[in-house]
Amino acid sequence: MAAKVKANGGGGGVSAVSAKVPAVAHPLAEKPDEVASNISYHAQFSPHFSPFKFELEQAYYATAESVRDRLIQQWNETYLHFHKVDPKQTYYLSMEFLQGRALTNAIGNLNIQDAYAKALHKFGLELEEISEQEKDAALGNGGLGRLASCFLDSMATLNLPAWGYGLRYRYGLFKQRITREGQEEVAEDWLEKFSPWEVVRHDILYPIKFFGHVEVNPNGSRKWVGGEVVQALAYDVPIPGYQTKNTISLRLWEAKASAEDFNLFLFNDGQHDAASVLHSRSQQICAVLYPGDTTEGGKLLRLKQQYFLCSASLQDIISRFKERRQGPWNWSEFPTKVAVQLNDTHPTLAIPELMRLLMDDEGLGWDEAWDVTTRTIAYTNHTVLPEALEKWSQPVMWKLLPRHMEIIEEIDKRFTTMINSKRLDLESELSTMRILDHNPPKPVVRMANLCVVASHAVNGVAQLHSDILKSELFANYVSIWPTKFQNKTNGITPRRWIQFCNPELSGIITKWLKTDQWVTNLDLLTGLRQFADNEVLQAEWLSAKMASKQRLARYVLQVTGESIDPDSLFDIQVKRIHEYKRQLLNILGVIYRYKKLKEMSPEERKKTTPRTVMIGGKAFATYTNAIRIVRLVNDVGAVVNSDPEVNSYLKVVFVPNYNVSVAEVLIPGSELSQHISTAGMEASGTSNMKFALNGCLIIGTLDGANVEIREEIGEENFFLFGATAADVSRLRKDRENGLFKPDPRYEEAKKFIRSGAFGSYDYNPLLESLEGNSGYGRGDYFLVGHDFPSYMDSQAKVDEAYRDRKRWLKMSILSTAGSGKFSSDRTIAQYAKEIWNIEQCRVP
C-alpha cells in the first residue's frame, strides 16, 4: 500500500505526483491506469479550484467526477431503455432522502473499488481518505429519509423502473454541535461548494403557484388565477444498482424566481429588498428541512414546501406520460403506466393536485379524474403518534391553495354522502372519519384521512404497526375497504449497511457461505447457523468485531476527545431524540449503574462488566424535553468520564451530529444496541435491522420491527423487557388512578440527579414529566417508570451474557444469520408486486 501523503499547498506533495499522471479522458475506465488518467483529466479540465492545486479536497472532486462519467453513461442507457419499452413506472414522493456519502456506494455498486484504490495510489492517496472528504447530503433526518434511500438502492438493484422525487434543501435540518450547554444547531454546509453527484436539468422547469383565487367560467369549469408563481428546477442524482447497468434517478426540486421577477425600476430607485421579493421568497422554500412551524409564517412555509414537491413532481410525471403518446390522451391508461407512492402524509397534496391538473388543465370530469387519481396513488403510514398525523389549518390552506381546498371539500362531501347512504352503522363515527374537521376554534384538514380515502392501497411498515393501524387508527375504514390495507415490513440495503461499511465481517460471511450472492439474496445468511458454535468462525468473528470497535474508538476520540476502551462492552443508542424512543430510560439506567459502582469496593468493581455507553441523535430545536435529554447525557458523561474510581468500568459518550456516515462507523463497532421505545409507538425502526445484521445484540421492547427481528433471530438471542402494546392503555389508566408503585432503583436514580451530582442545571421540569398521575406533560405518558425495573433486570442479563465470550459470539452470529428477512430488496419486491404492479426492466 502507498504511504498516506499529507496534502500540502503549492506544487509539493500530491500536486507534484498528479503532474506525472497523464490527463486523458477515459469516461468508462475500468483499469487503474485509465482511471488515474481520467481523475487527472477532471482535475485539469473540469476545474473548480485554482490551477496546480491538487490536495485532498480537489482529489475528491476529481475522483467523484470520474465515477460520475460512468454513472451518466449507465443513466442515459437506462432511460433510453425505459423510453423504448414504456413500462409502468413508480414515482416515490418523500420529503426526505437521507443518502449518506455517494462515492464508496457508487464504486461498490459498480464493482470498481480495486481499480479506484489502485488509481489513487498513483497519486500517493488512499481511497479511504478521499472518501472522508465527502459531506453527507443533508436531505433528510431520520428513519423516514433513510428508508427512502434504501428503497432507491433496491429499486435500482432489482432493475425496477422507478424515480425518487424530493427537495434540494440547501441547509438541511441542522448540523449538531455539542457544547457545555448541550446541543447547538448550525446550518449544514453540504452545498457550500457544490455536489459533484447532481446534474442540473435546465430544460426541466415547471411553474408552481401559491395564493390567488378561483374563477368560475361560464361553462362551469374552474380556474385558479392570480397569486405568485415560482419555478421548480430539476436536479438529478444518479442511483446505481448493485452489479447491474440500471441506474435510476433521484430528482430533487429547487425553487427559483426568473429574471422577469426582478424589478429593475425599484432596484435603481434604491428599494433593493422590494425589487427582489419573489427571489427571496423562492429561496426560502428549499432552504431548510422542517422549518419551525409555531408561527403562521412557518406553517405557510412548510405547506409551500409540501405543495411545491407534489406539484413539480406530478407536472413532470404527466409531461412524461404525454411525451410518450400522441394526443388526445387516454387518461384511463394513466394508472397502467404510473404508480405514485406517498411516503407518509407530507406529500398528501399530490391527491388534490392530481385532481386539479386532470380537471382544470386536461378537461376531465370529476368521476374520471377521481378514478385515475385513486388508481394511481398509494400511501405508506409511518406513525400512530397523534402529533405526527398531520392536520393543516383550514384558513391557512384556503389562503395558500384555494383551488385545492375546493377539491378537498368535494372529496369530503362525497365521502360523507357515501357513509350516510351505504353505511348507516358508521354515522356515529363519521365525525372522526371525515377529512375536514370543522371544530370551531381550530378547523383542520386531516391529511391521513385524505390519504386513506383517496389511495388504492394503504400500508404500515412492520406487522405490529400494520395490525395497530387496522385494529385502532383506521379500523372504521377497514370495515369499508378491507382489501385496501397491507403490511410491508421495512428493510435496509445490505450493500451500504454491511458489505461496504463492515468489510471485515462481509469477507468472513462470504468465506463461510462460499459465495457472495448473499449481498443480493440476504436469506442465504441462514447458512451461518450451522457454524454458530464453530470456534474458528467465532475467533474470526471476534477479530472482525474488534477491528470495527478500534475504528469506532478512534472516531470517538477524534470527535469528542474521549478515550474509550475497545475491550469494554460497546452499548449504543442512536436515533432522533424523542420521549417515546426513551433515551431518558437509558440514561436513568446509566445513572443508577454509576451510583452503584461508586458504592462498591475496588474488588467488587473488578467483577463487573466494563461498559461504554454511546448515545447520539438530533433533538428538534423547539422540542424542550428532547434538548434537556441531550444536555443530561452530556452532563452525566462529564462526571462519569472524569471519575478515576469508575471510568475504567463505565464511560458515557454523546456522539455529535449523528448522520449516515457516523452510523457507518458506529453500527459495525456496536455489541449491544438499545431499541427501547414504549411498545406500540415505533412504527418499525430500521436501525434495529442494521445493528442485528452486523452481529450486534438488541435490548428492546416488543415494538415495531423488534417483534419480527426477535422471531427471526430466536428469542434467546434478544434481551426483552417492558410492557407490551396491549398493556399500554391499561397501564396509563392505572397511573391516572394512582395505582403505579415506583421501583426503589428508579426513585434512587431520579433523586441522584436532583442531588446536583451532575451539575447545577435544573432538571426538575424533565423529571416532572415522569411524575404526577395526570396532566399535560406529566404522568409518565411513555411508561419509563413502569418499564425501568424490567429494563434493569434485562441489563443485568446482558452483563452476565457478555462475560461468557463463547455464548455472546454464538448469539452475535445467530443475529446476523437471522437478518435475511430485513433486506429492502424483499420489501421493494413486495411493493412492486402487491401495490405498484410494476416489473423488472433490465438494461441489456
Image (cartoon, grey):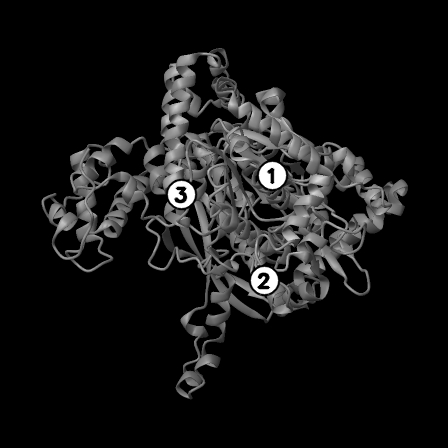
Between disc 3 and disc 1, the foreground one is 1
Foreground: 23 or 417?
23
* Callout 3 secondary element: loop
Q: Earlier in the sequence, mark 3 or mark 1?
A: 3
Q: Is residue 515 left or right of residue 684?
A: left
Residue 596's label in the rendered image is 1
Residue on which the image places disc 2:
292
| Amino acid residing under circle 2 | Gly
Q: Residues within 10 Å of mark 2 (few under 14, many from 20)?
A: some
Foreground: 470 or 370?
470
* Callout 1 secondary element: helix
Q: Position of residue 488 (x, y in %)?
A: 61, 32
Foreground: 741 or 266?
741
Q: Are marks 2 and 3 in contact (CB under 8 Å)?
A: no
| Amino acid residing under circle 3 | Ser
Q: Position of residue 759 (x, y in %)?
A: 57, 57
> Residue, x 41% and y 83% (percent of image)?
267
Between disc 2 and disc 1, the foreground one is 1
Quarter of the image that includes the N terminus: top left
Q: Let me know if residue 218 appears in the view.
A: yes
Q: Are marks 3 and 1 in contact (CB under 8 Å)?
A: no
C-alpha separation, residue under disc 2 versus residue under disc 3? 37 Å
Residue on which the image places disc 3:
563
> Residue, x 53% and y 33% (percent of image)?
605
Q: Let me know if residue 241 appears in the view.
A: no
Q: Residues within 10 Å of mark 3 (few under 14, many from 20)?
A: some
Q: Position of residue 245 (x, y in %)?
A: 35, 32
